[in-house]
Structures are given as C-alpha cells and as structure tokens.
Image (cartoon, grey):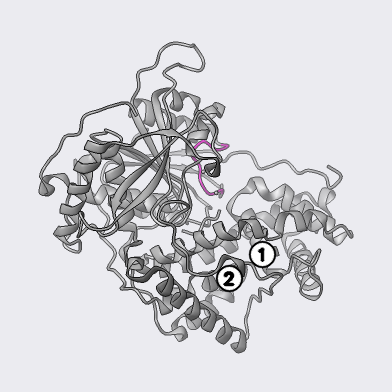
Amino acid sequence: MRTAAALVAAGSLLLTTPSAAARTPASAPASEAHGTAVAAARAASEGIDFGRCSEEQDLPPAVECGTLRVPLDYTRPDGEQILLTVSRSRATGEDPATGRAVPRQGSLVNNPGGPGVSGMYFPMLGVVPGWKRLAAAYDLVGYAPRGVGRSAPLSCADPKTFHQGPAPAPRHPSARVKRERAARAAAYARGCAERAGDALRHYTSPDNARDLDVLRAALGETRLTFLGSSYGTYIGALYATLFPSHVRRMVFDSAVNPAPERIWYRNNLAQSAAFEDRWADFRAWVARHHDVYGLGATAREVRDSYDVVRERLAGEPAGGKVGPAQLHTAMLKAAYYDDHWPQRAHALSAYLKGDPGPLVEQAEEHPEAAAEAENTRAVYLAVECNDAPWPTDFAVWDRDNTRLARRAPFETWDNVWTNLPCAYWPAPRRKPLDVRAGTGELPPTLILAAERDAATPYDGALELHRRLAGSTLVTERDAGSHGLAGGANACVNAHLTAYLLEGRVPGRRASCAPHPAPEPSSPAA
C-alpha cells in the first residue's frame, strides 16, 4: 500500500525440480515456476559480488553493495535480464550485551513496502540499539525491487514536471475537477506505456516474489528469512504461497489484506475509511494538549483550526510553496506515524500565530527529490495496476468515493487521484493469486499489527492470519502507527526478537498494550 512513506557467507543451495521447488497455483503459468527455478539455480552459481557501495547510494562503509541478475519475464528466463541493487551488512557475531560469540543464522532480507520503495538502507539498522541482537546473528540484507532506484528504474513522466507547485485539494471535488483529474490520470497512464513499452507488464507483485526467491538463492540460503512491512507483507504472502518449502522464518509487519477480491481497488477504499479514524486520533491528541498548541479543546475545534489553515493556503500559499495539497500530504504522515504528531501540531499552531516557517519546512516539495518521487509513483502504479482488475469506468470510482467521502473526507479523493491511472492502464491486468497455506505447509510465521493502523487496516492482518495455517498474530491494542518492527513498543519487539533469534512464537495470538503517546512539544521548542 502507499506508504511513502520511508528503510553472505557461502552456503549450499538444495536444487530441486520446478515441480518440487515451488507450488504452482492454477492461476500461475507453469512456465513462470520453471523460469524461477532456472533463474534461482543460475543465481546460486553466480552469487552476488559484494563490494563498496557507490557514492550515489549514500551508504556507510560498513554496508556492502552488489547486483542481482533476474529475468524481466519469468516465462523467458534466458531472455532479457535486469539488474537489481542489493545491500548487506555482515553479521557481527557478537552479543551486544555480553560480548560473547553468537552463531550466524544466515541472511535477514527486508522489503519495506511501497510498492516503489527501496530497502537499500535496511542494513544501516544494525547499529541501532534495538536491532543489534539481530545484527549479531544475521546479515542484514536490503534491496531495491525491480523498477525502483537503480534497479531497472521505471519512469512515467518527466521528473521536472512532477512537482508543479502549490495545488488545491478539495474534499468534495466538482464535476469539472473530476474531469480534469481523469484526463490527467489517462495521460499519465499513456506516459507509462510510452516510456516503458512492453516491459511495463512485468512490474507485478508475483514477479517481485519470484525476484525474492532468486535473491535467496544468490545469497546461498536454502530457505528464506524475511521481514516484510506494509506492501512487503503482500510480497511475503505471495512468496509463502508460491515457495512454501523455501520459507525459514517470515515476519509480516502491518499486513495488507491479501484476499484476491480486495487487491487493490477495495483495499484502497478501506484505507481511505481507516485514515478518517486515524486523523480523528491525531485531532483528539492535539485537543488534549490545547494548552500547548492552542488549536482547540475538542477534536472538532482542532478540525476547524485545520480548515482555517487550508482556506488561507488556498488563497495565499505559505512561502509561495505550500498550498492545500502540500498541507494534506504533510498531515497524512501524521495519520501514518504518531511520532509526527508534535511537529505537525506545532506547524499548524505556528502558522495560525503568523509564523509559516515550520509548515513550509515540513510540507514544501523539494525539486531535488522529484526524480525519486516520480520513480516511486511510477512503480507503485505499475505494480498495483498490473496486479488486478480495476474499474475502467470513472462513474464507478465517482459513485463509490462520493459515497465514502461523505463520512471519510480526509483522504478519500486524494487516494482516488493517486490510483486513478489504473482505470486507464494500457498493460494487461492479472488475476490475483489466492494466498494461503495449509496445515504443515509452512514453518511458524509471525504477523505484527496495530489495531488502528490506517495504511493497512487491521482486518488485513486477520485475513492473512486466517489464510496462513500455523501463523501467529501479535496485536498492538489501541494504537495505529504503521510499521511495528523495531519501533516504540518493547512488547512487540520482544516477540519479534524471540521469533527471529529462536523461532519462538507466543501461541496462535498475543497482544501488547499500546506504546506511549508522544509527548507534546511547545511551539517555543
């Protein structure tokens, strides 16, 4: 899901025939399973030549970089190849508390979500206190999925035109605005086809899962240890369905609902509804700290203050750079992560008191980041539009989202504009795989979820838990920050560490009390 949010020692590979190496669901061509086995065998032989990272990758010396060769089209494993960038920090082998030697457990591979987000920075977490025990036992491995960053980068538009300055963001757009946005979405979809050509059809979630198996083989691992967050959980779920015998340990952090009928149109409707509740959580927190921010003593009063800011920005963008659309993007981050709450509340408070500086600093678009932002959106749309059928008649989008916006205006139409190119997508749409694993098909897996997560609503974790026999669901109650692994909840982190280091899970379900709400910071600070 959209989360813009965003972060080997030699071994042996047990080669098996394609029929034994991977399950082939009825909806997946057998040739793709065969192509994956061919590519994985080749990767096991070649490995990854890790070395110093380039300056452009902006990684510290302790992190090594390399490239992985994968087929663009898994039905043609010996056809056109693309290179994926991979990063790694080696296991330290030393317990950070006692200094004693720790046996290496292989590679821990991460996908941080997206689609369209790079995981190249994941190995840097090895120096963070909460990750040092894991970094002692595991090589921490990140990568940029196909299309992302330097991994056969995908582009649908000129990055110079991506940020077009202050823009409106009506909660209930007029018919004229809808026509304009539909035309813009159709043009963007055409741009994707023109720039990518026939390769556009090969940016899909199943292909991302197949790339993951080739990466596993190249790292010399017979079975995969994987941590997927947000959209990364869907890649992991597909991997568990396609390659159950290749799973060692798998963490699903903030799970996407994998039900085929929910991929992706209905998941986005559910996300918009959930963001309304999370936006209310933020406003209630601000109201509790009215003495600090002065934005209102009730959630409704805080909303009124926010609306005043929106209206003023529509008339005169802050610093000439921040209009209602940029404001909304900044505030959406508060609906993802509650550690943003003090800064966002301070920015609103300062603006209403005559100081637009903090708001401009938090919400302005940076031209130097336009290429990365355009690449992220291109990959996001390519994957989600290719993965599943979408309504092709704008009247369906209009009906569903007009109805939803009556009770959930905060994010509904902005979510539509993000995804609307899928209505006009020129590449073939696929039928989503039926994610599931029966009893005994997988080793224990771990699902982490917050009850009030808006980016990946909690029912997604429940659905994944139901579909993967033997999985354990750890719930953070009454909390809503997106992405729990290594975060602020010590209880959740203890379950994560016990699972990855010892393979130990707390039964079928467990719960943790919410992490503490953030402390307010005064505007003067």
Check the image and name the residue furthest to the bottom. 176
Q: Earlier in the sequence, mark 2 or mark 1?
A: 1
Q: Is residue 31 above or below residue 440?
A: below
Region of the chain picked out in magenta, as a range: 481-488
Residue 287 occupies quadrant? bottom right
Which one is in front, 146 or 506?
146
Q: Which mark is residue 453?
A: none
Q: Position of residue 298 (x, y in %)?
A: 76, 59
Residue drawn at (55%, 69%), measured in percent from left and top? 158
Q: Which residue is disc 2 drawn over?
A: 414
Q: Is residue 372 left or right of residue 13?
A: right
Q: Mark 2 touching mark 1, by CB under 8 A? A: yes
C-alpha distance separating marks 2 and 1: 9 Å
Q: Which mark is residue 328?
A: 1
Residue drawn at (60%, 57%), measured in percent from left and top? 278
Q: Is residue 159 above or below residue 424?
A: above
> Does residue 442 appear anywhere in the picture?
no
Q: Amino acid at mark 1?
A: His
Mark 2: which secondary structure? Answer: helix
Disc 2 crowd, CA 10 A, few/some/many (<14, 14-19, 20+): some
Disc 1 crowd, CA 10 A, few/some/many (<14, 14-19, 20+): some
Q: Is residue 119 in the magenta section? A: no
Q: Magenta: predominant secondary structure element?
A: loop
